[in-house]
Amino acid sequence: MIEHIIIGIIIGIVVLLIVFLVVMMVKRHKTPKNNTPIIDCGQLIAALGTNANIIDVTNEQKRIKIKLKDPSLIDQEAIKNIVISAFLVGNELKILVKENVDAVYQTLLLNKGG
């Protein structure tokens, strides 16, 4: 009888140990290893030549297309300092946003002046 109780306790301890290890492994894999800086939308709008220069904004997955009134108002150094990839074609600037794309898109959309 005592042998059955001891075996039950040992099995319980082993099961708890296995569950603990599995939970720790899953938790470790879910922790993002992302060093991507968060984009400061205020700096981005200023780099675009203020919100009055923004005519329209479109979201295409991780790219945001920004239609500008005057592309010459873009501060290229400020764009580089924000650490985003940007491509200007005509009066349309395409930026690649790796994290929080929807938040950046919504902020630009709400602050467009055009």
Image: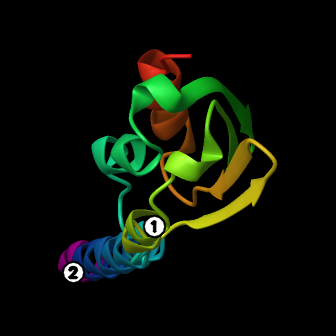
65 shown above or below 52: below
Q: Residue 8, image x and y in percent?
A: 30, 72
> 66 or 106: which is nearer to us?
66
Amino acid type, residue under disc 2 in the picture = Ile
Kindly indicate whether the residue at mark 2 contacts the one at mark 1 (C-beta within 8 angstroms): no
Q: Dot 2, how many residues are within 10 Å of its Cα: few (below 14), some (14-19), or many (20+)?
A: few
Residue 53 left/right relative to 45: right
Instruction: Report the quarter where the N terminus lies.
Output: bottom left
Way the structure is coloured: rainbow
**Residue 108 — which label?**
none
Give how far across and how far down residue 66 sits, in percent: 66, 37
For label 1, the SS is helix
Question: What residue is pinned by disc 1?
Answer: 30
- Left or right: 107 as drawn, with respect to 74: left
Q: Residue at x 70, y 34 (%)?
A: 59
Mark 2 lies on a secondary structure that is helix
Disc 1 crowd rating (10 Å Cα; few below 14, some 14-19, many 20+) is few
Q: Which of pointers 1 and 2 lies earlier in the amino acid sequence?
A: 2
* Residue stretch in magenta: 1-6
